[in-house]
Image (tube, rainbow, N blue to C red):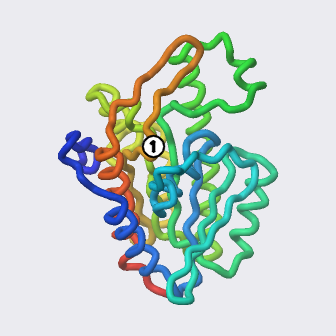
């Protein structure tokens, strides 16, 4: 298995807030001055905004509380020495706000250097009361199967977005799939199943969709990687079933640092057009 998929041992992973934000700052500095932005995609409830908050350090504040699901494009700007890096979190699935957000990306003068695509191995939060009621008869495994199917369609939409943007701007140059909420599936059989679904060497419909994108753009122009991460360890509850979170904060921090380092490595060789 890819070393980036090996879960750090509890108590031996000692990354702290300063180390994580230090890696993130290195990424920011690589992209500053290039009118660049990073785009975060994925289904609603996959943890996009919370993950970004933790990578930037905002979520590592002890008083931090996760935001609710947003139906709008969430934008933020990181400033360093008078320069700016734009961040955009797109709403999940095909909503008017998502389509408008994609159109805005095409028209924006900033360059989309990279895409962080967040998935959750079927452990996607269902926050709409209407959706909860409609799926009340589904057990946890049936719910996850539905979410995994939706996740695949969402990825295909994202790949189409990336290809369209690349045809116009010859960017983005990288995609990282963040397999979020790994605290819920860190046991060996579940982790191996997630690895088979998401990792580059995996053989699934999910990886096939990204390989097709890579083939159409060209491997010399675009690269991708998948790795597990956890931003907000918590149990997952559905009906009368509970999946317990199994990672501690030190393990969470190590995985966040690995993800930030991977994003930095992908961006390090980026050149201005």
Position above or below: 150 against 144: below
Q: In this view, does 145 lie to the left or right of 110?
A: left
Residue 259 horizontal/vertical position (percent): 37, 57
Residue 273, visible in the rendered structure: no
Residue holding disc 1: 180
Quadrant hosting residue 73: bottom right
Quadrant hosting residue 77: bottom right
Position above or below: 70 against 55: above
Disc 1 secondary structure class: loop
Q: Which residue lies furthest to the front in this view?
A: 63
Q: Which residue is drawn at 35% across and 36% down?
A: 196
Position above or below: 95 against 216: above
Q: Which residue is drawn at 76% across and 56% down?
A: 99
Q: In this view, does 157 lie to the left or right of 174?
A: right
Residue 91 horizontal/vertical position (percent): 69, 51
Residue 42, visible in the rendered structure: yes
Q: Residue at x 74, y 75 (%)?
A: 107
Of 124 and 62, the residue lying toward us: 62
Q: Which residue lies furthest to the right in this view?
A: 96
């Amino acid at each position: 298995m890819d070393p980036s998929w090996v879960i750090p041992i509890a108590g031996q992973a000692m990354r702290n807030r300063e180390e994580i934000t230090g890696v993130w700052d290195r990424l920011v500095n690589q992209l500053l001055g290039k009118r660049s932005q990073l785009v975060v995609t994925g289904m609603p409830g996959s943890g996009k905004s919370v993950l970004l908050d933790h990578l930037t350090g905002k979520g590592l504040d002890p008083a931090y509380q996760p935001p609710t699901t947003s139906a709008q494009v969430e934008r933020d700007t990181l400033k360093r020495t008078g320069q700016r890096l734009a961040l955009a979190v797109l709403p999940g699935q095909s909503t008017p706000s998502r389509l408008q957000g994609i159109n805005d990306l095409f028209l924006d003068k900033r360059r989309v250097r990279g895409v962080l695509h967040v998935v959750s191995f079927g452990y996607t939060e269902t926050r709409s009361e209407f959706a909860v009621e409609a799926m009340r008869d589904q057990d946890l495994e049936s719910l996850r199967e539905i979410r995994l199917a939706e996740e695949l369609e969402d990825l295909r939409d994202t790949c189409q977005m990336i290809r369209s943007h690349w045809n116009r701007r010859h960017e983005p140059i990288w995609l990282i799939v963040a397999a979020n909420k790994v605290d819920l599936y860190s046991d060996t059989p579940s982790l191996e199943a997630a690895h088979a679904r998401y990792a580059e060497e995996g053989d699934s419909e999910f990886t096939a969709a990204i390989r097709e994108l890579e083939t159409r753009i060209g491997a010399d122009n675009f690269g991708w990687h998948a790795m597990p991460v956890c931003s907000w360890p918590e149990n997952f509850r559905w009906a009368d079933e509970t999946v317990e979170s199994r990672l501690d904060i030190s393990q969470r921090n190590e995985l966040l640092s690995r993800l930030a380092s991977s994003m930095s490595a992908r961006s390090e060789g980026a050149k201005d057009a």
